[in-house]
Amino acid sequence: MPRALITGITGQDGLYLSELLLSKGYEVYGLMRGQNNPKRELLEQLVPDVHILTGDLTDLASLMRALAEARPDEFYNLGAISFVAYSWENAHLTTEVTGTGVLNALEAVRLHTLATGQDVRFYQASSSEMFGKVQTVPQNEDTLLWPRSPYGVAKVYGHYMTINFRESYGMHASSGVLFNHESPRRGPEFVTRKVSQAVARISLGLQDGLVLGNLEAQRDWGFAGDYVEAMWLMLQQDAADDYVISTGVTHTIRALLDAAFSTVGIDDWTGYVTQDPRFVRPAEVDLLVGDSTKARERLGWAPKVGFEELVRMMVESDLAEQRRISGRS
């Protein structure tokens, strides 16, 4: 039975990845920060077969202990402070977790291999936010990185550190440069879930409106459940490498609103949505669209869920949740 260790196990990617690996017969271990983590109950409810370990990406010793207990064949580093807006408010903590945390994870794997002789394949969750002020459209594995947020800068550090460990120590270490990927499990602080949750509440008469920032920003949105399959495929290759994972199609925030409101039968949403400069990024990333040709050709990967289906899935999930909470039909 193959074994896997996942950091960031309580995030949407960690949940989908653990379900995928369990379905393939893996023994799955998840690293969780703190004994009273509020997401532990959700994890135990959705994927009760995951073995929970406590640890922290900022604490190398805790990562070493987790590796010694899990003895994984594969290590998926999904842990990060991943809300971009927050990174401007606390750049130092974002750097420690999202950047230096990658170095700690890589070093823990390297030292574990030296001590035990066990080869561990490593996956790093890189991000399209690394492209920032995009230099080419679409973006691929060779596009110059120009991050425009502390989060993006931290991700670039982790990305290049992964490459360095691969080249310096011969580690099977791969990075997935994932473009925006969403699901009903996305945190409500992210714009897609903020929209789907608000639309559900507006349709039920529980909320009057929605406040957003830049409605013209464009993103390449896919389904998180599709993207975790690409993570797994990377670690099944004979040689480690880096791959852009994307749909290759962009939509604006306005298109997101069109799709979300149409799910509840509202064609004109302009009366429900207002813009506030507080929600505009200090340095905007205007157009992110990925070229995942390499992943399609070498991994045999392709997204299955389209944009309209994804948005509908999220709104319908939030409708069900809000009906349950409020007792409204």
Image (cartoon, rainbow, N blue to C red):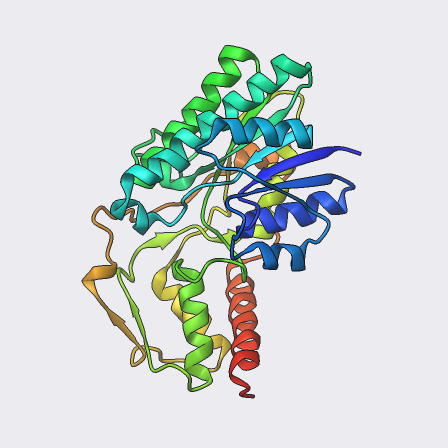
Find the residue positioned furthest to the front: 35
Q: How many marks?
A: 0
Res. 132 in view: no
- Quadrant containing the N terminus is top right
Q: Nearer the viewer, residue 174 or 244?
A: 174
> Is residue 267 toward the left or the right of residue 88 in the image?
right
> Is residue 145 toward the left or the right of residue 3 in the image?
left
Q: In this view, does 173 lie above or below 19?
A: above
Residue 286 percent location from the top left of the image: 29, 49
The structure residue drawn at horizontal position 53% and vertical position 66%, both measured from the top left corner, is: 314
Q: In this view, does 208 lie above or below 194?
A: below
Q: In this view, does 127 lie above or below 105?
A: below
- Quadrant containing the C terminus is bottom right
Residue 241 percent location from the top left of the image: 55, 24
The structure residue drawn at horizontal position 51% and vertical position 59%, both measured from the top left corner, is: 307
Residue 52 percent location from the top left of the image: 64, 44
Q: Nearer the viewer, residue 60 or 270?
A: 60
| Quadrant of res 138 | top left
> Is residue 154 toward the left or the right of residue 9 in the image?
left
